[in-house]
């Protein structure tokens, strides 16, 4: 499983940002960070050259489904930015990082 994070420059002088993306799996009534977060310094725009990738190895369980989302944090380098983080929409998968009965 993987999740990608990037940023888009709409205006302003920033040319680089420190981007972090983390995959989270629903567990009971909360969320647990899973796998290896993606971290890097990237230029705006996305695409394979301007993004970071988080990865989580998981196991498929027939007949079971699991819920995931990812959190993307962008910190502009050398410039002030807001503290908000992007939370992606939830997705369902038959693959679980945490095990069969999560």
Image (cartoon, grey):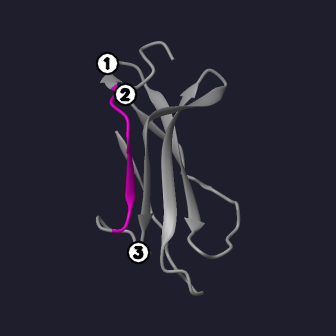
Q: Secondary structure at mark 1?
A: loop
Residue 77 percent location from the top left of the image: 56, 71
Q: Which residue is mark 2?
A: 94
Mark 3 against mark 2, which lies toward the viewer?
A: 3
- The residue drawn where x is 57% and y is 87% is 13
Q: Nearer the viewer, residue 52 or 59?
A: 52
Does 83 appear in magenta? no
Instruction: Reply above or below: 15 against 58.
Output: below
**Quadrant of the rendering where the N terminus is positioned:** top left
What is the spatial separation of the Cα atoms under label 1 and label 2, in whole angstroms? 7 Å
Residue 51 percent location from the top left of the image: 38, 62
> In this view, which residue lies farthest toward the front?
78
Instruction: Reply above or below: 31 against 47.
Output: above
Q: Quadrant of residue 57?
A: top left
Left or right: residue 55 compared with residue 24: left
Q: Which residue is mark 3?
A: 45
Label 3 or label 2, whichever comes before in sequence order: 3
Chain part drawn in magenta: 50-58
- The residue drawn where x is 48% and y is 12% is 101
Q: Which residue is mark 1?
A: 62
């Amino acid at each position: 499983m993987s999740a990608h994070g990037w940023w888009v420059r709409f205006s302003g002088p920033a040319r680089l940002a420190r981007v972090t993306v983390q995959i989270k799996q629903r567990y009971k009534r909360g969320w647990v960070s899973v796998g290896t977060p993606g971290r890097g310094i990237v230029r705006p725009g996305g695409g394979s050259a301007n993004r970071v990738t988080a990865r989580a190895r998981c196991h498929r369980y027939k007949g079971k489904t699991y819920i995931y989302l990812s959190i993307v944090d962008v910190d502009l380098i050398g410039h002030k930015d807001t503290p908000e983080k992007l939370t992606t929409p939830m997705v369902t998968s038959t693959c679980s990082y945490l095990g069969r009965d999560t």
